[in-house]
Image (cartoon, rainbow, N blue to C red):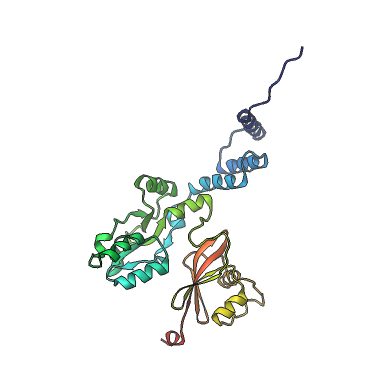
Amino acid sequence: MGEHTSPIPPKLARLSWLQEWTQRWKRAPRSKDDLVKALLAAQQHHIIDMDSRHMLEGVLWMADKTVADVMVAAPKMDLIDIHASQDELLAFVIDKAHSRFPVYESQKENILGILLAKDLLKLQRAPELNIRALLRPAVFVPESKGLNDLLREFRHTRNHQALVVDEFGRVSGLVTIEDVLEEIVGEIEDEFDTQEIETDIFALADNVYRVNGDTAMDRIKDAFDVEWPSLDEETFETIGGYISHAMGHVPRRGEHLQIDHLRFEVLHTKGGAVKWFRVTRHTSAQAES
């Protein structure tokens, strides 16, 4: 009577596949390139899906990166002046739409601390309250700090943001936990992302708008009354494609471009494309000044 064979448990089947792959390469993976090839083979064998492979590869490559690779450079940081009035403060926070802001005094490198946007509610209840009392301590990290170390530090201290200093101790940028995690999982959707966009142009304040990168060029022309200079005799269907071509590269957060009386600033990117712009329309009086 023949022996009865039972199905191979899934875990053992996966182990067998890994052993088979190792035998094929005659050795265990000895480099990150080997591991990347192994992950690709695992996806092809339906052991992991494509998203999992991309995240695992992100973990591998993140180990080689430093804070300087992902930080927002100092000129693009949104800072608050400690002496700003409450009206100016509130308007700035609403316009920039961040949850945390470095606060400075006199010079932008003189950072006093971090203001959480939610703490502004305390000013509404007690207008006499000094903004200094609302500041949280600022965390400083060097440009050379590895992203793995920074992520570990963020987890242990529960901080979400750090100011970056160069070798001379000067503030050179800003890095957030989102900047680090995006190296693993890709661009993270935030408050600017919606499942279905019914409106592509939102008014934020006088002459300031939030514009979706997929907005049609004709829609922009009608909304802002602007003439578009020709770019190498090419035509573009969306404002995101037009701005990217005009800049000559995929725009990054904080970059901006002036076209006629409109200033386009990149608010958010995803998958190599601009998701949202902040558009400021300058009046004729502002343009003359």
Left/right placement of residue 21 relative to residue 173 reads: right
Q: Residue 280: image x %, image y %? A: 47, 76
Quadrant of residue 162 within the rendered picture: bottom left
Q: Please name the residue shown 60% across and 72% down the image.
A: 242
Q: Which residue is rendered at x = 51% and y = 69% of the image?
A: 277
Tell which of 44 and 149 is nearer to you: 44
Q: Quadrant of residue 236?
A: bottom right
Image quadrant holding the C terminus, namely: bottom left
What residue occupies the far front of the structure in this picture?
125
- Residue 239 in the image, given as x and y percentages of width and height: 58, 72
Count of all numbered marks drawn on residues in the image: 0
Does residue 144 appear to the left or right of 53 in the view shown? Answer: left
Residue 84's spot in the image, x, y percent? 29, 71
Tell me where residue 51 appears, x and y as whole percent.
59, 47
Q: Is residue 67 positioned above or below 4 on the image?
A: below
Q: Quadrant of the N terminus?
A: top right
Along the line of sight, which residue is nearer the eye, 86 or 229? 86
Where 66 sits versus 78, above or below?
Answer: above
Q: Quadrant of residue 133?
A: bottom left
Residue lying at the far right in this picture: please name it: 1
Query: Which is more toward the observer, 257 or 212?
Result: 212
In this rendering, would 7 be left or right of 201? right
